[in-house]
Image (cartoon, grey):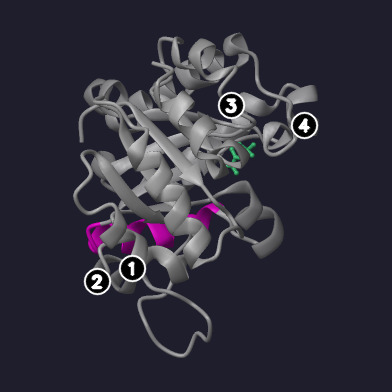
């Protein structure tokens, strides 16, 4: 996959079927012509229906917020990469900080999920980012390097996008400054270069996430190594999400 512009909306545990359909319909009505790839990540139970809703839209896909680290079997409540792929899901988030914090997702579990996702033709947005204490103690660059190395080193990264989401900025209203975000994105490219070479580093799309909104998206997306955003709260309002898409 070559480097592209992305705006992805992580709905988390929000929206019923009718609310989700209404949100997507309003987004579609207000989208102009653009080259930005749009992805929505609704709760998994809505994916199948929303795949139909966006079917005729250009550069618009539905993804899953999570997939199982297991292929199949006795894992009650889990959803596999193959199941997601079978209903038209095209992307999956792996390693989101809420999965790491509340569900014990480690870099090694993330690696298993990414492997299964790629085997089942899903593209992956792999989320990385440091906690506030790690930034305050100047460990942020090392933490992100470890997250990337441990999860990706044994994989083909061609269909992997990386989202840098500082944990202290997610859902807090506090955003990384463009300088902080750019520093980390450039660092991520150098980590990728060491692992996979210059071509992969140059061609991997890197997204910023963490209280990105209609007001600050333009400044962030103007940074040399930022290719778009992973948006939480602001993706739940059609108007804000569309403004963010128009921020390149
Ligand atoms: C997220 O959950 O990935 C996220 C970036 O959330 P928010 O935009 O609400 O900070």
Per the rendering, the mark at residue 48 is: 1
Per the rendering, the mark at residue 213 is: 3
SS state under label 4 = helix
Graded by Cα atoms within 10 Å as few (under 14), some (14 to 19) or many (20 or more), the crowding at tag 1 reads some
Q: Nearer the viewer, residue 198 or 219?
A: 219
* Marks 2 and 1, the one that precedes in the sequence: 1
- Residue 172, above or below 190: below
Residue 165 visible, this angle: yes
Ligand 1: which quarter?
A: top right
- Residue 68, above or below 163: below
Residue segment shown in magenta: 107-121
Q: Nearer the viewer, mark 1 or mark 4?
A: 1
Q: Image check: 70 left or right of 13?
A: left
* Residue at image point 55% right, 14% down: 183
Tell me where residue 84 appears, x and y as whole percent: 33, 68
Graded by Cα atoms within 10 Å as few (under 14), some (14 to 19) or many (20 or more), the crowding at tag 3 reads many
């Amino acid at each position: 996959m070559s480097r592209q512009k992305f705006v992805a909306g992580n709905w988390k545990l929000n929206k019923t079927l009718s609310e989700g359909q209404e949100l997507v319909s309003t987004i579609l009505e207000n989208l102009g012509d653009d080259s930005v790839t749009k992805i929505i990540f609704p709760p998994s139970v809505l994916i199948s229906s929303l795949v139909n809703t966006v079917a005729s839209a250009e550069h618009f896909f539905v993804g899953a917020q999570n997939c199982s680290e297991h292929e199949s079997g006795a894992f009650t409540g889990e959803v596999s990469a193959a199941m997601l792929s079978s209903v038209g899901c095209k992307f999956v988030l792996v390693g989101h900080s809420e999965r790491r914090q509340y569900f014990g997702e480690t870099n090694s579990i993330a690696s298993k999920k990414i492997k299964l996702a790629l085997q089942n033709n899903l593209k992956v947005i792999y989320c990385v980012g440091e906690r506030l204490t790690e930034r305050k103690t100047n460990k942020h660059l090392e933490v992100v390097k470890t997250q990337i190395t441990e999860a990706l080193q044994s994989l083909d990264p061609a269909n992997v996008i990386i989202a840098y989401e500082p944990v202290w900025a997610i859902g807090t209203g506090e955003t990384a400054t463009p300088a902080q975000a750019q520093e980390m994105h450039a660092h991520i490219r150098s980590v990728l270069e060491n692992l996979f070479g210059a071509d992969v580093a140059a061609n991997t799309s890197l997204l910023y996430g963490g209280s990105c909104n209609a007001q600050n998206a333009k400044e962030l997306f103007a940074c040399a190594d930022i290719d778009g955003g992973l948006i939480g709260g602001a993706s739940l309002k059609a108007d804000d999400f569309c403004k963010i898409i128009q921020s390149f």
